[in-house]
Amino acid sequence: MGNTLLSIAKADIKTAKNLVNSDDKYQKHQAAYLTQQVVEKTLKYAISLKTGGQPWGHDITKLVIFAQQNGVDVPDFICKKAKMITSWEVVSRYYPTSVIRRDTIAHVIRVADEWQKKLK
């Protein structure tokens, strides 16, 4: 399941990269949603490498804490922005009036992309 999770996260990141610069606000929000999914799935994959299992849940902050408790190296930017990234799962799909900065989405994408490369 672990490799499948990383493969799905890699597919999500490709789609997020394609959507993040869209002039369409809803597509930009989809980029944010997919980026949240990328971080969540990458965290769960990295945790599975250390523990042999995957935690349940969508809260990036809780997943970061669990990962760190199990010796997983999580990028500092992901740790610092965990609460915001967690919020993208809901606000990007149900509250399209929310402001989600394109440059922040793009930065999380870059950090997650580099992190995934290190996990190979």
Image: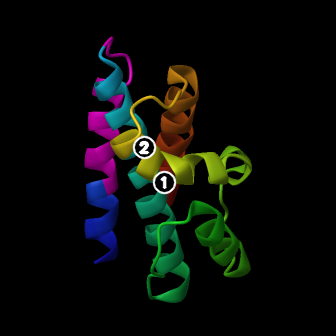
Q: Residues within 10 Å of mark 1 (few under 14, many from 20)?
A: many
In this rendered view, identify the residue nearer to me: 88 or 68: 88
Q: Point out residue 58 in the picture as x, y percentages from the top left corner.
A: 47, 67
Q: Is residue 120 visible?
A: no
Label 1: which secondary element: helix
Residue type, mark 1 in image: Val
Q: Is residue 15 magenta?
A: yes
What residue is at 72 percent from the left and 80 percent from the top?
Answer: 69
Label 2: which secondary element: helix
Residue type, mark 2 in image: Thr
What residue is at 53 percent from the left and 87 percent from the top?
Answer: 51
**Residue at label 1?**
39
Left or right for 58, reference 62: left
Above or below, 66 against 91 in this view is: below
Quarter containing the C terminus:
bottom left
Quarter containing the N terminus:
bottom left
Q: Which mark is residue 35?
A: 2
Q: Point out residue 94 in the picture as x, y percentages from the top left corner.
A: 36, 44
What residue is at 35 percent from the left and 21 percent from the top?
Answer: 25
Disc 1 + disc 2, Cβ < 8 Å = yes
* Res 86 → quadrant: bottom right
Main secondary-structure element of the magenta-colored stretch = helix
- Magenta range is 9-23
